[in-house]
């Protein structure tokens, strides 16, 4: 017997309006947080700009909800 492929082509849907028109963006380095961190905690505070830098943010193009 071969491998059974149970993959279903599910699309990401907006939790608010159900639209499938979704924009995916990766959050990057935040210079504002880094500057504030440097002022408050010195050179070690520069690392604050990398907090949650690898998170992905989804935005509905219809209703503008982000999650």
Image (spheres, rainbow, N blue to C red):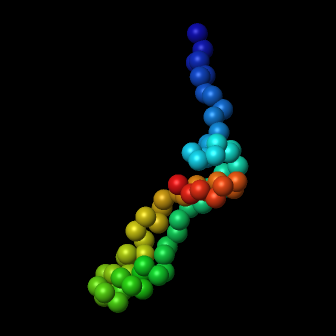
Q: Nearer the viewer, residue 1 or 44?
A: 44
Q: Position of residue 15 (x, y in %)?
A: 57, 45
In the rendered image, the vertical position of residue 30 relative to residue 24, given as above or below: below
From the viewer's perspective, is 2 left or right of 53? right
Whether residue 50 sits left or right of residue 40 in the image: it is right
- Looking at the image, residue 24 lies above or below residue 53: above
Using the rendered view, name the quadrant where residue 20 is placed.
Answer: top right
State the residue in front, 62 or 46: 62
Q: Nearer the viewer, residue 52 or 13?
A: 13
Q: Is residue 19 above or below residue 46?
A: above
Quadrant that contains the N terminus:
top right
The residue shown at (53%, 54%) is 67
Residue 47: quarter of image: bottom left
Whole-percent x, y for residue 64 in the image = 64, 58
Left or right of 46 in this view: 25? right
Compared to 51, does 12 lie above or below? above
Residue at 43 percent of width and 75 percent of height: 49
């Amino acid at each position: 017997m071969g491998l059974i492929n149970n993959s279903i082509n599910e699309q990401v849907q907006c939790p608010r309006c159900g639209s499938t028109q979704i924009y995916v963006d990766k959050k990057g380095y935040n210079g504002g947080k880094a500057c504030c961190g440097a002022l408050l905690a010195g050179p070690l505070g520069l690392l604050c700009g990398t907090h949650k830098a690898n998170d992905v943010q989804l935005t509905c193009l219809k209703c503008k909800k982000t999650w």
